[in-house]
Amino acid sequence: LREGRGSSDSSAMEPSPRHDSGYPNFDLETEMMDLHRAPVAGIDEAGRGPWAGPVVVAAVILDPDRIPQDLNDSKKLTPQAREDRYEEIMATARVAAVIGQVARIDRDNILQATFWGMRTAFRTLGVLQAVALIDGNAVPKRFPGTACPLVGGDGRSLSIAAASIVAKVTRDRIMVRLAKRYRGYGWENNKGYGTPEHASGIQRHGVCPYHRRSFAPIRRVLALSAETVPAGP
């Protein structure tokens, strides 16, 4: 392993291919725990691409003796399986979930909001000596510890898979609650992603406070709305 400390260099070497069996396992965590004599946190996010709602980042330290069964990349699990695994993770692991609100996304951009969430979630775990496996190809700048990026990590590392489940379930629950306040966008189904149902809702109801105004589809809607406002006398 070549690890980074607060580096966003995407050329950092990730773990060797021998670990990539197509299913998540605990091999990388064991290797890093042996190397650093410290627990390992998996870090992942949910919600970088939607038009609306927050981005959620989770950090999870699994108990090696109580790892829930059937952990996998959250995208490969059914909603009910995600909910079941979520409850098991919360009952057996150390977990931190951080919400990057729309205002932060629009101010800093989605990548920086996600990196902020990664740093904050890791700190929130409260395990100062921990090291991290981060899903993706970069370690955020100013990351408060030793970390290793892992492309496709939610399908390779059980800790990252657990973090992906926590982040996804947390965000989905937020979007279902918001759907009750802001009806007509179909967020209970599309979770804020750019579906035809969501686009139709924007045409009927306009843009609401939880839409990401920095995202191009929302910017276009706002620009068109401004163009159709009648000119003053």
Image (tube, grey):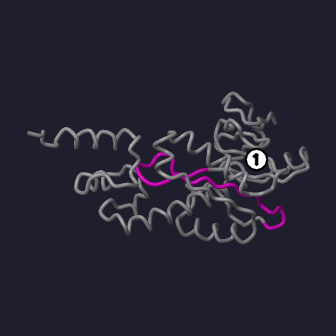
Say which residue appears at 69% left-offset and 52% top-offset. Answer: 160
Residue in the foreground of this view, choosing between 80 and 160: 160
**Residue 233 magenta-drawn?**
no
From this view, report whether residue 54 is shown above or below residue 20.
below
Q: Can you tell which quarter of the image residue 111 is in?
A: top right
State left or right for residue 164 relative to residue 29.
left
**Residue 52 magenta-drawn?**
yes
Q: Give the image location of residue 98, x and y in percent.
A: 61, 56
Q: Can you tell which quarter of the image residue 169 is in?
A: bottom right
Image quarter of the N terminus: top right
Magenta-tinted stretch: 45-66
Residue in the foreground of this view, choosing between 137 and 122: 122
Image quarter of the C terminus: top left
Say which residue appears at 72% left-offset and 41% top-offset. Answer: 143
Residue type highlighted by circle 1: Ala
The residue where tag 1 is placed is: 132
Residue extending farthest to the front is: 233
From this view, report whether residue 208 is shown above or below residue 177.
above
